[in-house]
Image (cartoon, grey):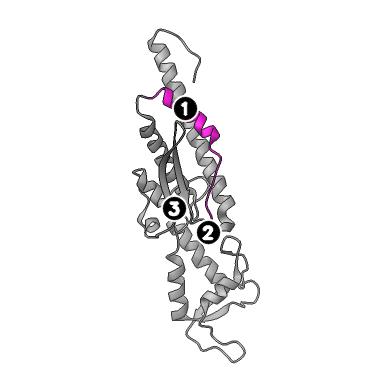
């Protein structure tokens, strides 16, 4: 496993501007923004997509079923001496998994050369793999709970490593959101999605601060070109 780390300097600039126009404390705003961030990142962590269009449990389960179907087919037959029925679906799966855990080889193309696997062994293994869906996203669960947020049960069912903490660096209050459940081969993907979330929060805070300044100026009788 590996941790996710991203540069937050631009976010800190936007938060400072946002805080200047807020009546709430730094700690309150930091927790609120942190909750929005960690929930958004969790939505984008596989099986979620880059755009965070919703929680993707069903999509993740379908991908697993489709991947296993590319290399194995369940059967009650004993097979033949030359091509016996297998009882080790995990070994077959591990042999064909690539990169981020996906199967890129389809043994159904042309002549169906998929491994014949004893049906009960295949079904048991398939259910085991399906239950893993949401493990990487679950690395954000402790941080979300710490900030008062919540993630779906199919994610929080996993006891994945992660944390949310608030501390001090000099005069600065520092919020750390940690996901240590990301597989090494998926780190770059999750990093990029985390950066996208920070960018989204950056512009949301800048816009909110600008709108507040514009409103305050208009209430004071000034006309502004902000917004």
Q: Residue at x 55, y 47 (%)?
A: 191
Considering every residue shown, the one lying at the far right of the view is 110
Whichever of callouts 3 and 2 sits on the residue coming sooner in the sequence is: 2
Mark 3 touches mark 1? (CB < 8 Å): no
* Residue 144 - label: none
Quote the CA–CA distance across marks 3 and 2.
11 Å
Q: Residue at x 41, y 12 (%)?
A: 218
* Residue 162 - label: 3
Q: Is residue 55 visible?
A: no
176 vs 100, nearest the viewer: 176
Q: Helix, strand, or loop for circle 1?
A: helix
Near mark 2 (Cα within 10 A), the count class, few <14, some 14-19 or many ≥20, is: few
Quote the CA–CA distance across marks 1 and 2.
33 Å
Whichever of callouts 1 and 2 sits on the residue coming sooner in the sequence is: 2
Query: Compared to 147, does 3 lie above or below?
Result: below
Q: Position of residue 84 (x, y in %)?
A: 56, 87
Considering every residue shown, the one lying at the far front of the view is 170
**Does the magenta segment cover residue 69?**
no
Q: Helix, strand, or loop for circle 3?
A: strand
Give the image quarter of residue 108: bottom right
* Residue 1 - label: 2
The range drawn in magenta is 1-22
Q: Is residue 98 left or right of residue 39?
A: right
Label 1: which residue? 16
Give the image quarter of residue 186: bottom right
Mark 1 touches mark 2? (CB < 8 Å): no
Q: Helix, strand, or loop for circle 2?
A: loop
**Does the magenta segment cover residue 4?**
yes
Q: Is residue 94 left or right of residue 151?
A: right
């Amino acid at each position: 496993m590996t941790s996710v780390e991203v540069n937050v300097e631009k976010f800190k600039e936007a938060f400072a501007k946002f805080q200047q126009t807020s009546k709430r404390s730094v700690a309150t705003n930091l927790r609120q923004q942190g909750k929005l961030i960690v929930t958004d990142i969790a939505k984008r962590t596989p099986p979620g997509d880059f755009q965070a269009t919703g929680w993707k449990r069903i999509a993740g389960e379908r991908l697993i079923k489709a991947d296993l179907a590319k290399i194995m087919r369940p059967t009650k037959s004993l097979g033949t001496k030359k091509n016996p029925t297998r009882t080790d679906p995990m070994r077959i799966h591990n042999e064909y998994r690539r990169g981020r855990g996906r199967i890129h080889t389809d043994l159904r193309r042309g002549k169906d050369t998929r491994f014949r696997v004893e049906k009960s062994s295949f079904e048991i293994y398939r259910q085991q793999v399906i239950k893993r869906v949401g493990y990487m996203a679950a690395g954000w669960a402790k941080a979300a709970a710490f900030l008062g947020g919540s993630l779906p049960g199919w994610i929080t069912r996993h006891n994945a490593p992660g944390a949310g903490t608030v501390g001090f660096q000099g005069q600065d209050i520092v919020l750390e959101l940690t996901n240590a459940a990301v597989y090494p081969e998926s780190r770059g993907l999750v990093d990029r999605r985390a950066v996208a979330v920070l960018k989204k929060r950056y512009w949301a805070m800048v816009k909110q601060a600008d709108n507040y300044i514009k409103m305050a100026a208009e209430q004071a009788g000034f006309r502004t070109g902000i917004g």
